[in-house]
Amino acid sequence: MRRLALLLCAFAATFPAVGQRPATAHAAGKFSGQAAYDVTKQFIAAAPHRWVGSPDHTKAEAFIRSHFTAEAAKGNVEADPFTASTPAGQMAMKNFIVRYPGKKDGVIVIASHYETNYPLRDINFVGANDGGATSAFLIELGAYLRAHPPEGYSVWLVFDDGEEAIDSWSDRDSLYGTRHLAAKWSQDGTIKKIKAFMVVDMIGDKDLNIDRDSNSTPWMLDLLATAAKNTGHSAFVFKNSTAVMDDHLPFQRRGVPVLDIIDLDYGPPTSEHPEGGYHHTALDTLDKISPHSLQIAGDLVVEMIHLINQHG
């Protein structure tokens, strides 16, 4: 199973007073959930089966790069190729980093994996919610940041590769892209500049409820609660408590403040898929996600950027 999650009972979230703003004042209006949905549709049509080593994986790389030509022209797009040792042997993978320079010394990183699950390569698994919608989310967030350059910390978007297990989920067989990136940035000193590392994962779910992940940094969870209150989205966060193994862990283990923005409860649960019957099945299709959910996630992430700048 890709992630370990313990779904517990519902509880009332508490919202710290510091940093609260009225819902009418939040800065997320320019992010378009509809645009993110439209890009999701285009992405999974162009590269539906994006498992590592596939022709569609190469198409996914080209699709992502095609949306950041303006940033590439300024030297702000980095391809980060690496070779991962996996149960299937040495495999070539590639992260992409898109940078939006800010005016304060420090970086906020927002990441999502773009590949599809390798063990599901023989079924019609397109990962509309699991990798598709969040890749499109980052593309639309890039459009927002292009129009509204960061006034505080720089913002980096990371399209990471190899989040999924190649054989069976374990510490060694998972999170290849972020493990590589965390190690690389530790060696060259970049990691010291990171003020916050946020992951967006499975947030296109029509029935959106973002989990309270105990592997995330407590003050980041508090800020997410504040962001939800400020944007009028408190009903969509923290119904469930989880302990999620996801792309934030390699950075958490190196002391970076992290937040996993994830809705792990995806579809009616089954005995095989207690996290939800759409998760890691051919049912993870475009009709299971919505522009509304992507809008909520966009509002929250843009507000989180603001609050992290206040916090720092």
Image: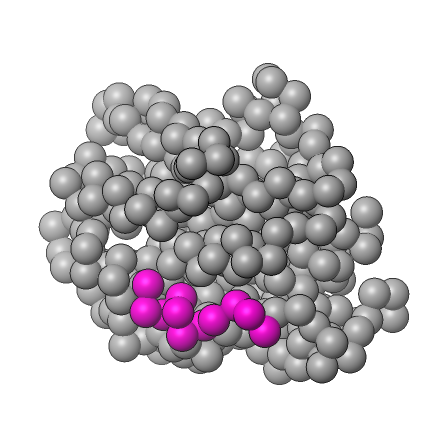
Which residue is situated farthest in the right direction here?
A: 18
x, y percent for residue 168: 32, 41
Instruction: Answer with left or right where residue 311 lies relative to residue 286.
Output: right
Residue 1 in magenta stretch: no
The answer to which of 36 and 2 lies nearer the viewer is 36
> Colour mode?
one colour
x, y percent for residue 264: 46, 64
Query: Considering only vertical position in the picture, is 57 above or below 282?
Result: above
- Res 108 visible: yes
Instruction: Answer with left or right where residue 272 lies relative to residue 244.
Output: left
Which residue shows up at 40% across the image and 66% down it? Answer: 36
Q: How many numbered callouts?
A: 0
x, y percent for residue 93: 31, 31
Q: Quadrant of residue 287?
A: bottom left
Which residue shows up at 33% across the image and 43% down it? Answer: 65
Which region of the structure is painted magenta?
29-39
Q: Quadrant of residue 16?
A: bottom right
Which residue shows up at 47% across the image and 57% down it? Answer: 143
x, y percent for residue 209: 53, 74
Which residue shows up at 60% across the image and 18% down it? Answer: 188
Which residue is situated farthest in the top direction here?
A: 187
Residue 37 in magenta stretch: yes
Principal secondary structure, stretch drawn in magenta:
helix
- Res 130 visible: no
